[in-house]
Every structure is written in C-alpha cells, then in structure tokens.
Image: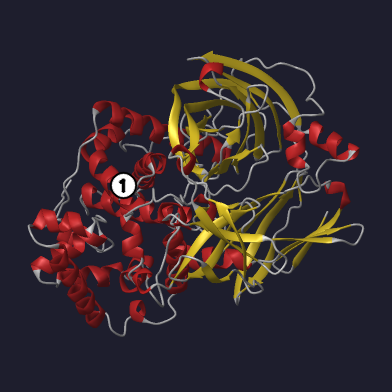
C-alpha cells in the first residue's frame, strides 16, 4: 500500500504524512494487543448477530449498546455527594447458551429490591408487588474469597434493563455496622467486553447490623439483557472513611436552604471538601474575600447545579438553584469529606442467567416529531413496569452493515434530545412528565435512544398513552 | 464467523497486524481524549479497529489511496471525541472528584473555532489545505493538538519549547485558519456544533 498519497478526506493527512509530528506513545504489549483483538472481534461478531440475526458480519447496526449500569445505595444515609463514579462494562449480545444453573424460588416480599421499586411512595401496593415479581427471578449465587462473601440474590428487570440485589459480607474483624462500602470497579460481562459500555454513578452502601452490605446494581442495554447470561465482577472492596472524623476534628459547614427550609446545598468550611465541583471565581475571587462558584450536588439521584457566593468568613451569603430558589442560611453542619481506603483486595466473579419474564410493550411508533424547529422521526417506544425507552432518528434509519456516522455529524439531534417533552398519561387522567435527565441516552450514528428508569413501578395497563415530542402513542 | 469479501483481507490476520502496529498510537489518542477512564479507553480502542475493519470489508477504505496509520488516527480522534461527548453529555456520568482532569478533548472542544471545524466532516479537504498551508512549526503544533489530541504540556516537551509558546502558536494558527476559511461554511455563526459545544463545556467544567 502506498502510504504517501494524500486522501482529501483526511483533514490532517498531508501533515501527518510529513513524519514530523507524531506523539510519543507506548506500544501495546502482546497481552494488551491480544485484549484489543479479542474485544474487536467480539464486537464484530456480536454486531453481526445483533444486526441481522444471521451469522454474518454484514449486520453491524451497533444496537447492542449498554446504555447504563449503575449501583444505588440501598441504605438510608444521605446524598451521593461522595459517590464513586465508575464505568461498568457489560457484555456482547452474542450469547452462548451457557449451562449456568440458577436457583428457582420466589423473591422475598421484604426484599430491598422491591422496596427500591417502591421508593417514590414508600412501598409497593399488592398489585405493584405482583407486577414487579412477574419480572423477577431468584439467582442465589454465592462466592466467597479473601474473607468476603458475595451473594447475588435476585434480579428484577425487563427486556433492556435489570436490577440486581447483591449482598456483600466483609470479614467481621475489619468492619463494623454503619460503615459505608463500595467497590473500586464493577464490571458486568456477557461473554466478553461489551460494545459501547456505559457510565454511571456508583454510590456506597452501608454495612447493616447483620453484617451485610446490600447493593443494588442496575445494568441496561438497548441490545437486551433479559434471558442472557452475565458475569458480575467486583474489584477491591473499598471502605469510605470520613476524613474529618479520622483527623479528629469537625469542620463547620455552611448550609443553604430554600424558602421551605430544605437543604439545597452545603459546603464544609475546609476548602478540600467544598471543592468537589469548583468552577469559577467570578465576579470576585477568594482572595478578595467574596467569591462565587458553581457546584453540582446530587438530589434524589440527580445532579443539581448551584451557584453560591460566600463572604470573607466563608459564610454562604447568596445562592441560587434553578429559577425559584431563594437563600436562607440557617445552620451549620459537620462536613463529611469521605476518602477511600481499600478494605479487602480481590476480584469476585459470579455468573448467572437473567431468566425472568419480559413485561415490555412495544408501541411501534413511526412518526415525525418537531423539536426546536427540527423534524426528527420517533422510531419506536417501549414501556415496561420498570422503564420507558424511545428512539429518535435524524434522517433515514441506518441500513444494516453501514458504519454509524460519528455522533459529531448529529450534534443538533444530540443537543435537541433534552428538549423533547415526554409525558405519560394514565387512564385515571393523571399525567407524569419525564425529564431528560432521568435515565440515560445512548447514541448510534443518527439514532439516539432515551432510556428512562421509573422511580416507582408503573403498571403499563394503567397507561392511556405516552406523548413524546408532541406525538401521542396510545397503548 | 465473520463474513469476508472475496479476495479481501481476513480479519483474523489483518486486525492482529494492525493492532500490533498501531494499537499503541490509537490508545494514546483515545487516552488523550478520554483522560482517566480506562474502560472507556479500552472500548474506544476496539471501536476504532472495528470501524477500520468494517471500512476495509465494505470497501470504504482504500489503502492504495491513504496510509492506514493516518486513516486510523482519524478514526481514533473521531471515535474518542465522540465517546467523550457522550460521556460528558450525561452529567451523572461525570466523576465529581477530579478524576476527569485534563482530558484533552475538553481542551479541544472548549475552543469554539476548532470545535466547529472538527464538528464537520464535509469540508475536511478544505481544512486540510488550510492546515497544510500553515508554517511548519504552527502546522506541527496544530497537528499534535487537534489530530493527536496532545496536551499543550506534552507538545511543549516534545518540541522543546514552552507551554506559553505552544499556546501562542495555537492561537496564531487558529487566527490564520479562520482567515483562510473566512466565508466558508465552517466559519458561519450558528453552526450546529456551536451550541452543543457550549453546553458540553459547561457540563465539563462542573465535572
């Protein structure tokens, strides 16, 4: 091949060919190269299967994207301010029908998993419980290593998303109730590394009185998870330690509340704990004694942006959050700057099959919607008791086998995704608006899919219609 | 099994060689863009080689026209920036503890002129010509920054100059490019990328 010819489609081609400008980099080791090759071939293989249902490489439609994997704390303590952020990687769509056994049985009615799905109202009704259980399965797989017991207990999910309840029991001699734990990394694999992957938050969980740490881990893929076999990998058990407590000192913090007395933002007096999301110093500066900055904190699992102004003494004198916030400084609290420490090194792997019923309903929409002056096509809508997802296309659907355009070519669509109004209308006349920040977006070329996880289980039979971007799809 | 084009290369022999030769460079570009996100980097690297193979298989890439290294660099840059944007577009996905420090894509995307240039693919030939016409020093700095997504500090170290000098060269290079591209679609206000970049960068600041 002639490497000295310039392809005009390569914007930097001629200069790069000069051989002058190339960064210093480390070549892959043989092991690393093998890993890249395995992942690449797996993606090609999975794309082929996912795209056409046939055994060819031509069906690469890129649909097997994991759109989000997250773990939520199941304990009752506070915000996720210090939650660890992790990337979870799940598996390819190509499945080996593995002979992994799973235990039959029923999910305990007192399961934290059921409580999780009833968190919005405090509990699930009897009908809602039945609905949740119909999409659930007992897994009951246990592994014990390095003194840590990992028990993957049960799962509730739908076609594209699943929630796992995992109890982790650390050694008694190194832990005590009330401590918060997490893992350095969580990986969910199906055969090999997932194409796409997914980012999400991973918060800590609290060691309960019975010596276990309950984790709820959420994984999703618009390529589907139901009926598939996964391996959950947990890497290095991490204990979260209060830095201030550890240092034997308590730092005063400023708390800003809204007009209703709700704590909206707080900052510890020590600079180290307040700058977990520092941004600007306009209009003043810290050295001037008065400064402003923005931060993002977490409320109800969502990031919320605040702007605060502090005086020379570090007191919050003004803050805003959203359009209606007002400020009132009412109290000082103890800062809770948490730091990590490895409690137990190791990797714990458990393989299981997500063998539950899928209660999803496809609405089969194919209609134009108008967003911010642009016309997009609402390709499909799927709803289940746990989640809602819909796909929006800018232009024509990508034919199978065609490499997706870079998302850079579809930035207007990406930008507009947060402008698409979504409202669920129930048969009793009530409605529920869905914010774009709920759930996650996954993109593939000119297609973007919004996956929304409901904070409370919803009975699709009670839904009259779902309005998306002005188009109302009836169930 | 992978479908092969008649008389085309075999993925099982072609890809290992490509990965052996260029995997390190591809990973370097992905790492520059994605910062401390090892899983995303791994995913991005394999995405790049998947894209390469699919282009090769479909006939979309002709090795007789363009060197594979440059072609791979282009794919890597686009894939890495695309992935970075997707990550950044989900506020809940951003680390709040400073782990995201220095992702070069942030720096690149935070520069509206260049962000707009990189956002479009249909004027690449024109941009290539404009870049090629830059003085060699500016051109080198420009390529390292926007093709390989190198950090300013790394560029300064490689070229034996100061970070300030690199920043000045980049500034002059952008001015020069802007003049060369004046009147073209790339320089028009209201480019689809502009607002997205602005929003994206705001998110990144808080990350």
* In this picture, residue B16 sits left or right of residue B91: left
Q: Quadrant of the N terminus of chain A?
A: top left
* In this picture, residue A155 sits left or right of residue B154: right
* In this picture, residue A373 sits left or right of residue A147: right
**Residue furthest to the right:** A428
**Residue furthest to the left:** B160
**Residue furthest to the bottom:** B183
Q: Name the residue: 52% across, 44% down.
A: A83
Q: How is the image coloured?
A: secondary structure
Mark 1 residue crowding within 10 angstroms, few (<14) / some (14–19) / many (20+): many
- Vertical placement of A397 versus B131: above or below? above
Q: Name the residue: 69% across, 38% down.
A: A159
In the rendering, at what x and y percent does residue A247 appear? 43, 40
Kindly tell me whether residue A196 is visible in this rendering.
Answer: no
In the rendering, at what x and y percent does residue A337 appear? 48, 46
Instruction: Name the one closer to the observer, A303 or B7.
Output: A303
The residue where tag 1 is placed is B31
In the rendering, at what x and y percent does residue B24 appear? 24, 40
How many numbered marks, from 0 up? 1
Kindly tell me whether residue B183 is visible in this rendering.
Answer: yes
In the rendering, at what x and y percent does residue A440 appear? 59, 52
Q: Chain of mark 1?
A: B
């Amino acid at each position: 091949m002639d490497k000295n010819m310039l392809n005009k489609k390569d914007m930097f081609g001629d200069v790069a060919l000069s051989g002058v400008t190339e960064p210093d980099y480390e070549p892959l080791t043989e092991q690393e190269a093998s890993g890249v090759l395995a992942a690449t071939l797996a993606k090609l293989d999975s794309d082929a299967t996912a795209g056409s249902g046939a055994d060819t490489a031509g069906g690469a439609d890129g649909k097997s994207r994991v759109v989000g994997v997250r773990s939520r704390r199941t304990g009752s303590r506070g915000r996720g301010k210090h939650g660890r952020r992790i990337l979870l990687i799940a598996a390819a769509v190509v499945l080996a029908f593995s002979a992994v056994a799973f235990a039959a049985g029923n999910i305990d009615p007192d399961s934290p998993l059921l409580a999780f799905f009833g968190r919005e109202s405090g509990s699930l009704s009897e009908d809602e419980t039945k609905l949740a259980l119909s999409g659930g399965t007992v897994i009951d797989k246990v592994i014990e290593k390095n003194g840590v017991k990992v028990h993957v207990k049960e799962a509730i999910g739908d076609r594209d998303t699943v929630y796992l309840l995992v109890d982790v029991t650390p050694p008694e001699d190194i832990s005590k109730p009330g401590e918060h734990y997490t893992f350095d990394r969580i990986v969910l694999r199906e055969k090999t590394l997932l194409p796409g992957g997914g980012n999400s938050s991973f918060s800590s969980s609290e060691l309960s009185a019975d010596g276990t740490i309950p984790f709820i881990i959420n994984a999703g893929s618009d390529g589907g998870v139901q009926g598939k076999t996964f391996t959950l990998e947990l890497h290095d058990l991490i204990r979260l330690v209060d830095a201030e407590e550890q240092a034997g000192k308590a730092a005063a913090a400023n708390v800003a509340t809204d007009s209703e007395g709700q704590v909206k933002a707080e900052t510890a007096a020590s600079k180290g704990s307040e700058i977990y999301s520092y941004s600007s110093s306009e209009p003043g500066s810290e050295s001037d004694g008065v400064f402003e900055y923005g931060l993002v904190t977490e409320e109800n699992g969502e990031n919320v942006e605040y702007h605060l102004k502090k005086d020379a003494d570090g007191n919050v004198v003004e803050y805003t959050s959203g359009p209606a916030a007002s400020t009132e400084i009412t109290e000082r609290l103890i800062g809770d700057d948490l730091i990590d420490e490895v409690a137990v090194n190791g990797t714990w792997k458990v393989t299981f099959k997500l063998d539950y019923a899928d209660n999803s309903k496809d609405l089969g929409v194919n209609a134009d919607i108008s967003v911010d002056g642009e016309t997009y096509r609402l390709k499909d809508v799927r709803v289940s008791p746990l989640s809602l997802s819909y796909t929006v296309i800018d232009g024509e659907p990508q034919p199978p086998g065609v490499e997706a355009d870079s998302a850079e070519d579809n930035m207007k669509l990406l930008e507009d995704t947060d402008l698409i109004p979504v409202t669920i209308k129930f048969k009793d006349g009530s409605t529920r608006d869905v914010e774009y920040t709920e759930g996650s977006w996954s993109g593939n070329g000119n297609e973007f899919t919004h996956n929304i996880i409901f904070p409370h289980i919803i009975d699709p039979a009670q839904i009259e219609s779902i309005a998306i971007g002005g188009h109302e799809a009836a169930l | 099994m992978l479908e092969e084009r008649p008389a085309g290369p075999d993925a099982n022999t072609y890809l290992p060689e490509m990965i052996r030769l260029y995997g390190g460079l591809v990973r370097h570009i992905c790492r520059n863009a994605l910062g401390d996100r090892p899983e995303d980097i791994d995913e991005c690297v394999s995405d790049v080689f998947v894209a390469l193979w699919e282009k090769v298989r479909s006939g979309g890439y002709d090795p007789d026209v363009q060197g594979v290294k440059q072609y791979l660099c282009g794919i890597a840059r686009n894939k890495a920036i695309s992935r970075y944007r997707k990550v950044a577009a989900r506020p809940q996905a951003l680390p709040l503890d400073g782990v995201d420090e220095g992702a070069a894509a942030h720096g690149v995307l935070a520069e509206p002129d260049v962000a707009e240039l990189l956002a479009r693919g249909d004027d690449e030939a024109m941009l290539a010509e404009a870049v090629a016409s830059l003085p060699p020093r500016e051109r080198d700095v420009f390529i390292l920054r926007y093709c390989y997504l190198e950090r300013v500090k790394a560029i300064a170290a490689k070229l034996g100059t100061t970070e300030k000098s690199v920043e000045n060269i980049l500034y002059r290079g952008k001015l020069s490019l802007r003049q060369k591209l004046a009147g073209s679609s790339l320089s028009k206000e209201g480019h689809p990328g502009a607002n997205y970049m602005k929003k994206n960068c705001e998110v990144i600041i808080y990350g």
